[in-house]
């Protein structure tokens, strides 16, 4: 288990609220998808990914340094796993998702995002023989129906008219990789949470550096303006530093299969952003979709994991 953070008051309370932590994670990731699509062409994907994790690393390092020094021998003993976690949860996942957003629409990305729990369950079964309980499976199914209801505006037959492209395949690949990260997280070394997140953000940034240099060498560079500056500030702080701290803690508290249905809150928050920021009207299909998603998450997250399948 991850060592506890020594804090008091509201921080301690938040640190022990897995459902709130995972909900906030989904909120930050929804903003990341919408914003990532909005700045496509302004900020190259490898540049955005590398700056995202190097910025998070630099912000975390002063706070994590005492823990890193103490936990360094433990991290080195688990170096292969730490590199895999850095590559799947930070480098490859982000590079693929931001690259995919250069070619696809935010709607498609939000729809594909809803498949996240299925990838987590698949990796948990393949690697550790952990099966979904009937309650978890039913909860994921209900929340997935809610996602489809929201995105397809209540007309499930419209699914057939959605066209997928190379960007969609990249985004699906990002979720496949992140599902592996989620499934492996319970096997992480027993170190302080700040040690874990600081090491993986720094290692992820280093893994992305060659791709950043390649991107610059072909002339695909960041366009400096107020929009790109605001984008970089947002992605470094909210969907990166805070979201991964919250996500890792949520998994530590309730496990990957129970945490995975919170992926379905990402398109829910995306639709809420459209209502609040873009003037879209709240309609009946929104209410039905929200009810299905929230009901499914409540059902899935309160069910314990099934025992590992017999080998």
Image (cartoon, helix red, strand yellow):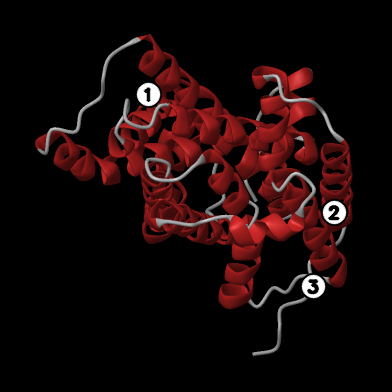
Tell me if I can see residue 8 in this picture: no
For residue 140, what is the image quadrant? bottom right
Q: CA distance from mark 3 to mark 2?
A: 18 Å
Q: Is residue 209 left or right of residue 160?
A: left
Q: CA distance from mark 1 to mark 3?
A: 40 Å
Q: From the viewer's perspective, is residue 32 above or below residue 304? A: above
Q: Which mark is residue 296?
A: 2
Q: Which residue is mark 1?
A: 58
* Dot placed on the residue nearer the N-terminal end, 1 or 2: 1
Tell me if I can see residue 184 in this picture: yes
Q: Residues within 10 Å of mark 3 (few under 14, many from 20)?
A: some
For residue 182, what is the image quadrant? bottom right
Q: Which mark is residue 25?
A: none
Q: Residue 82: x and y, percent?
A: 42, 53
Question: Residue at left 42%, top 44%?
Answer: 94
Of 11 and 283, which appears nearest the observer? 283
Quarter containing the C terminus: bottom right
Q: Residue 72: x and y, percent?
A: 40, 43
Q: Which mark is residue 306?
A: 3
Q: At numbered mark 3, what does the secondary structure look like: helix, strand or loop?
A: loop
Q: At numbered mark 2, what does the secondary structure look like: helix, strand or loop?
A: helix
Q: From the viewer's perspective, is residue 190 above or below residue 247? A: below
Q: From the viewer's perspective, is residue 205 above or below residue 159? A: above
Of 283 and 100, which appears nearest the observer? 283
């Amino acid at each position: 288990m991850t060592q506890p953070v020594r804090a008091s008051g509201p921080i301690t309370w938040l640190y022990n609220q897995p459902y709130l932590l995972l909900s906030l994670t989904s909120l930050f990731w929804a903003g990341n998808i919408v914003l990532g699509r909005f700045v496509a062409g302004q900020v190259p994907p490898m540049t955005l990914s590398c700056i995202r994790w190097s910025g998070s690393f630099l912000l975390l390092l002063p706070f994590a340094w005492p823990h890193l020094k103490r936990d360094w021998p433990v991290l080195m003993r688990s170096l292969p796993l730490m590199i895999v976690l850095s590559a799947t949860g930070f480098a490859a996942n982000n590079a693929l998702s931001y690259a995919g957003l250069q070619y696809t629409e935010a709607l498609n990305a939000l729809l594909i995002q809803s498949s996240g729990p299925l990838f987590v369950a698949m990796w948990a079964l393949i690697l550790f023989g952990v099966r979904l309980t009937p309650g978890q499976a039913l909860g994921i199914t209900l929340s997935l129906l809610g996602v489809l209801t929201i995105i397809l505006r209540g007309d499930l037959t419209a699914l057939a008219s959605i066209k997928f492209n190379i960007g969609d395949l990249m985004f699906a690949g990002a979720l496949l990789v992140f599902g592996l990260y989620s499934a492996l997280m319970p096997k992480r070394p027993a170190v302080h949470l700040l040690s874990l997140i600081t090491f993986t953000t720094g290692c992820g940034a280093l893994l992305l550096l060659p791709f950043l240099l390649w991107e610059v060498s072909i002339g695909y560079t960041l366009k400096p303006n107020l929009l790109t500056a605001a984008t970089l500030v947002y992605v470094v702080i909210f969907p990166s530093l805070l979201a991964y701290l919250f996500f890792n803690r949520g998994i530590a508290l309730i496990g990957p299969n129970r945490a995975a249905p919170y992926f379905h809150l990402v398109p829910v928050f995306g639709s809420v952003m459209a209502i609040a920021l873009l003037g879209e009207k709240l309609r009946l299909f929104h209410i039905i979709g929200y009810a299905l998603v929230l009901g499914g998450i409540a059902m899935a997250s309160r069910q314990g994991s099934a025992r590992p399948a017999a080998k």
